[in-house]
Image (tube, rainbow, N blue to C red):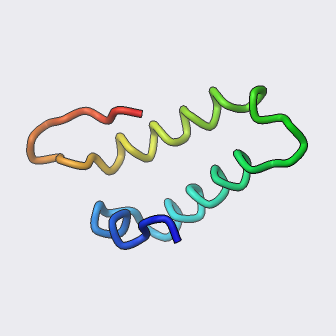
Amino acid sequence: RIGTPALATRGLAHDDFAEVGTIIAATLNPQGEFAEVRDGLAERVRTIAQRHPLYAELGATAAV
């Protein structure tokens, strides 16, 4: 468990959680391919973070 209540409170939906799970699985890939996919994974995380900002009412930007 990695803080699913906090993510749900932040507004993530079912599809977002599926994407988070896919990203986590890709980072744990035992084939040693993380370095090759790191930038793409970071962009996917950035997209989710921007879609569901932590403090939207403050106009804060996502930091990933």
The image shows a total of numbered marks equal to: 0
- Residue 9: which quarter of the image? bottom left
In the image, what residue occupies the spot 70% across and 45% down? 27
In the image, what residue occupies the spot 49% across and 60% down? 16
Horizontal relation, residue 55 to residue 21: left or right: left
Image coords of residue 52 (percent x, y): 32, 51
In the image, what residue occupies the spot 64% across and 53% down? 24
Image coords of residue 62 (percent x, y): 31, 35
Name the residue nearer the viewer: 32 or 56: 32
User: In the image, is residue 39 above or below residue 18?
Assistant: above
Residue furthest to the left: 58
Image coords of residue 18 (percent x, y): 59, 64
Q: Quadrant of the C terminus?
A: top left
Horizontal relation, residue 27 to residue 56: left or right: right
Residue furthest to the right: 31
- Residue 58: which quarter of the image? top left
Horizontal relation, residue 46 to residue 63: left or right: right
User: In the image, is residue 55 above or below residue 10?
Assistant: above
In the image, what residue occupies the spot 36% across and 73% down? 5
Image coords of residue 4 (percent x, y): 43, 70
User: In the image, is residue 14 above or below residue 44?
Assistant: below
